[in-house]
Image: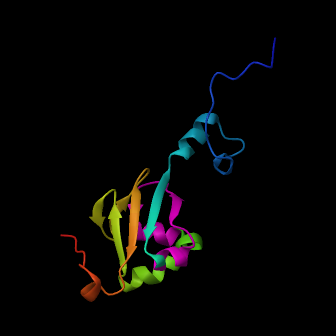
Amino acid sequence: MRRDRAVPWSIDIPNDRIVSGATARENEARKGTMVTLLLFGETLRQALGASEFQCEVSEPMTFKALLERNQDHLGVLLPFMNKGELLITVNRKVGGLDSKVKDGDTVKLTHQFNPVHDGAMWQNP
């Protein structure tokens, strides 16, 4: 039996997402449990140190819960959230702190310092 044959299948998972001892199917399932955060505005980018960030989600949750569960990375955004200075869109739709996010969603965050003078204040019906 030859062992130098190429494997007819492969799973493209970053090394930090592979759990040793897990089956290939379990690792493949872990691959698609991400929410992408895009940050707009120098204030948010400087606070987080990046313009894009990905978070793991195990189930649909509110955006506020996502921030609170990832405080080690996203804790710098909590003061903006508490002051109401974040404009949130989820998959191109205006959202808010109570908007549900799930696997595959893209959340765009924009800093709005003074909504009365700097632009429109977003309200959800």
Q: Quadrant of the N terminus?
A: top right
- Residue sitting at the far left: 125
- Asked which quadrant contains residue 10, the reply is top right
Task: Indicate yes or no whether the magenta region holds residue 79.
Answer: no
Residue at left offset 51%, top offset 68% = 69
Residue 8, above or below 39: above
Residue 101, above or below 9: below
Residue at left offset 80%, top offset 20% = 4
Residue at left offset 57%, top offset 39% = 28
- The residue closer to the viewer here, 42 or 66, is 42
Which segment did they paint magenta?
A: 43-69
Can I make out residue 39 in this image?
yes
Task: Name the spot of residue 16 as percent of width and height, x first.
Answer: 67, 51
Residue 2, above or below 104: above
Can I make out residue 62 in this image?
no
Task: Name the spot of residue 56 as percent of width and height, x first.
Answer: 53, 56
Visual colour scheme: rainbow
Q: Quadrant of the C terminus?
A: bottom left
Task: Indicate yes or no whether the magenta region holds residue 57.
Answer: yes
Q: Is residue 87 left or right of residue 38?
A: left
Q: Is residue 115 left or right of residue 18?
A: left
Task: Name the spot of residue 104 as percent of width and height, x first.
Answer: 43, 50
- Asked which quadrant contains residue 101, the reply is bottom left
- The residue closer to the viewer here, 17 or 36, is 36
